[in-house]
Image (cartoon, helix red, strand yellow):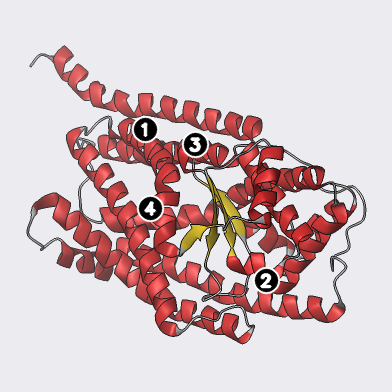
Amino acid sequence: MSGQQAVAGRTGPRAVPVVLVGLTLVVLSVSADLAWVLVPWTEAPAGPVDPDAGLAPAAVADARAVAASLRLPGLLSLAAAVLTAALIVLTGPGRRLLAQARRVRGGVVVQVVAQLLLVLGVVLLVRWPFGMWAERLRREAGLSVQDWGGWARDRLVGAGLEAVVLVVVVLAVVLLARWLPRWWPAVAAGTGAALVVVVSLLHPVLVEPALSELGPLPAGPVREQVEQVAVQAGAPVADVLVSQESTRTTTLNAYVSGLGPTRRLVLQDTLLAALPPEQLLGVVAHETAHAAARDVARGTVLGAVGVASLVLVLGTAAQAVTVGRGRSGRVGTAGAAGAVLLVVLLVQVLGAPAESLVSRQVERAADVRAVELTQDPQAYAEAMRTLLVTNRSDPSPPALHQWWFGTHPSGAERVARAEAGG
């Protein structure tokens, strides 16, 4: 080989990270632009906000005590999961544990799945005591009415569904890296974005029925009023369903999910039983406002671009390291499962402030629209108070926790906004 050819051979692979860096910067810029354009940036109420949301002092003290007690096991569980995944990936004993999974016969695919299930199993065991602690606190507060068998079943079903998604992600990354050793980050980014769209589309019909017993809202005045609000909001849904949650919890909730033909409005049976008609229609108006604004589609787009950005950043970094060391850029199977899980957990923690900020803005816009639809600000404010008291939610959570993990405006803000007419 001539000297010129040798130089070309050396510089060719090194050009790959450069191209990937450029692509990563473009995708990150698009992500920021999409967030700015798609998110409805709504100001907080200009007037004074009662931190107690107009609730009785005893109710406020009770809600704050319950919310504070539940924060600790939740934060410790998340910290324990991150630490466990890090120890598995970064320490000798952890790598030796993963080596046991690599002894499984059946090729790369079987070994990667075995690694992932091993890591997920260890993390699940580490988090289990914290989950039991939180469940015991919920029972003492009257928020949970589930027996331990039902609680364990729900937890295992949720873990199983998460495992399925992670298996697909890990296998996609490993196999793409083996098939396309130089360009796998770009292909994996597109694949990850497409997976987010597929999950959002199929979640209502595949995942939600596995987690809850769902059935249609019976015909009658309530359904007629709910459908009328949906039509008024400009967001007719494919179906209105009832989630049978009273065998698990006393808390109240409703949500919209799905895209296009799978979009539906789901009301918990506890909500239907607890709220008078005018408050129920306020909650329905809030959820149909989400549907009218296509918030699920908005979240799907942002999620898809976010996943693509993350894959590109991490893949580009991996390419730069491997090429810099004279390797082919191929990702091996060793530690892939633990590394992906560690990244997912870190993103869950470190990305929470940005995700929470976007979520709060979307929820603020839905609150404003709900008051416009119902033309009954006081009923909407009372609905928010009922949710606060029944769910034992702190009307004014600690500022740092609200900034980091608060997906909705504080209860105090929501009440103040409603009473101010939206």
Q: Is residue 122 above or below residue 293?
A: below
Report the amino acid beneath label 1.
Gly
Secondary structure of residue under mark 4: helix
Closest to the observer: 77 or 63?
63
Q: Which residue matches tag 4?
A: 206
Task: Decide if residue 283 is in sight here.
Answer: yes
Is tag 4's residue or tag 3's residue first in the polypeptide sequence?
4
Left or right? Give the position of 339 relative to 331.
right
Q: Which mark is residue 133?
A: none
Tell me which residue sits at (7%, 16%) in the image: 1
Q: Which mark is residue 190?
A: 1
Badge 3, how many Cα within 10 Å: few under 14, some, many 20+?
few
Nearer to us of marks 3 and 1 is 3
Tell which residue pokes out farthest to the bottom in this image. 140
Nearer to us of marks 3 and 2 is 3
Left or right? Give the position of 317 relative to 418.
left
Report the amino acid beneath label 2.
Asn
Tell which residue pokes out farthest to the front in this image. 220
Q: Which residue matches tag 3?
A: 260
How far apart are labels 3 and 1 at the CA level? 22 Å
Q: Which mark is residue 391?
A: 2
Closest to the observer: 404 or 247?
247
Is tag 1's residue or tag 4's residue first in the polypeptide sequence?
1
Closest to the observer: 239 or 167?
239
Tell which residue pokes out farthest to the right in this image. 47
Nearer to us of marks 1 and 2 is 2
Task: Decide if residue 91 is in sight here.
Answer: no
How far apart are labels 2 and 4 at the CA level? 27 Å
Where residue 289 appears, as percent x and y from the top left, is 68, 43
